[in-house]
Amino acid sequence: MLQSQLPNFIRKESPRDEEAVSARLLIRGGFVDKLASGVYTYLPLGIRVLKNIESIVRKEMDALGAHELLMPVMHPKENWEKTGRWKTLDVLFKIAGRDKKEYALGPTHEEVISPLAQKAIFSYKDLPLGLYQIQTKFRDEPRAKSGLLRGREFLMKDLYSFHASTKDLDAYYEQAIKAYKKVFKKLGVDTVLVEASGGTFSKFSHEFQVFLESGEDQIVYCKKCGLAQNREINDTREGGPCPVCGAIVSIRQGAEVGNIFRLGTKYSEPFSLTYKDAKGNTHPVIMGCYGMGISRLMGTIVEALHDDRGIVWPAEVAPFDAHLIELPGTNGKAKKLYKELIEAGIDVLYDERSVSAGEKFAESDLIGIPVRLVVSSKTGKKIEFKKRNEETTKLVDETFIRKYFKK
């Protein structure tokens, strides 16, 4: 893509009303724009990052054998009354139509997926079943001041699994954990599996946390044995003994990027979601749910991977593979290189604008594309090659670049 054709939402100054580093960098870099507290527009660069994250997530969900669907955002009040959460879930956005009929704007989809599954599950032969979606969610957060880490409107992947037995759920649960770990590894995010409260879903759950100083959660962590528990269920203080091995624990700040729950029959029973076994006996379907914050991951990656110049995107999620910068005196060499890289299947942002070299380099560092290629009169027949996460540069030829991106 020619950078002159990319809408320029890049800002020279950081927004003053954002506390999170990730929010400031994403807004400055032209990835998102803040409409209201906890509500953001995803701009062209941001959409590219989101799509890359979604692609990685979809691949692992499909490999798990789950099927993608898309459920409504508007949920009838009666569905939420069946589970008792219409009055008890304090973050629920509620709206009413002109016919006075009330709806919830879905923060989660148990009240929709359960009656839907009833139309596909009749026998033990229909189980297990996995259904997932990537959908916009809404939560009336009392404090939406952490950018994409805690929004009122956000993008989330949720997977629901349906089983004939607890044993089968447990096996699927472990496979889901492995799938989540693969996703986070591909995204370049180091996560820790943390035991936590189940909230309104179940007694206990597991969270995938990224240790960040800016994280809102407190994690009791033992480096010796690997114990990791949310302080919601473990009030051990800094320097206290580990309940497992007795070693000294530390309290780490974490940002949750995924959570998984064994729901059991909590939501199948209110909706009479049942199946018949081989003998014709009727049983409630046993459920699990597995959430992953897509837009939150985007913010978390930036919180974890940035420097004083800007964002440092991992190659797998970056908006482009390479940032080609043309400086004066190239006699068409940069344009020729751009065409050849595009033909080779390399996704390139080509900065051919008539602005200063300093402005081009500053913007390149800010938006954080993993590889910067500079063509100028000084490089001769070579191209200056620099990785965003390294300080050194080197002169290379086109063959080197093609081989690098084929790895």
Image (spheres, rainbow, N blue to C red):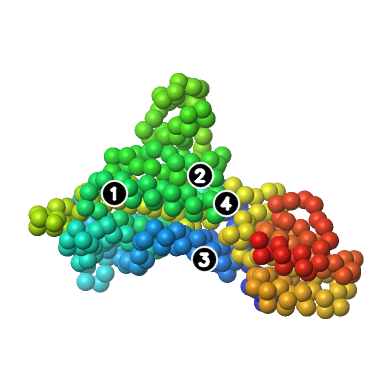
Question: What's the residue type where badge 3 is placed?
Answer: Lys
With respect to residue 227, does 99 lie above or below?
Answer: below
Structural distance between the alpha carbons of marks 1 and 3: 30 Å
Question: What's the residue type where badge 1 is placed?
Answer: Leu
**Residue at the spot of label 2:** 191
Q: Earlier in the sequence, mark 1 or mark 2?
A: 1
With respect to residue 11, does 239 lie above or below?
Answer: above
Q: Quadrant of the C terminus?
A: bottom right
**Residue at the spot of label 1:** 169
Structural distance between the alpha carbons of marks 3 and 4: 16 Å
Count of all numbered marks drawn on residues in the image: 4
Question: What's the residue type where badge 2 is placed?
Answer: Thr
**Residue at the spot of label 4:** 188
Q: Earlier in the sequence, mark 2 or mark 3?
A: 3
Q: Position of residue 121 (x, y in %)?
A: 20, 62
Structural distance between the alpha carbons of marks 2 and 3: 21 Å
Q: Is residue 17 visible?
A: no
**Residue at the spot of label 3:** 51
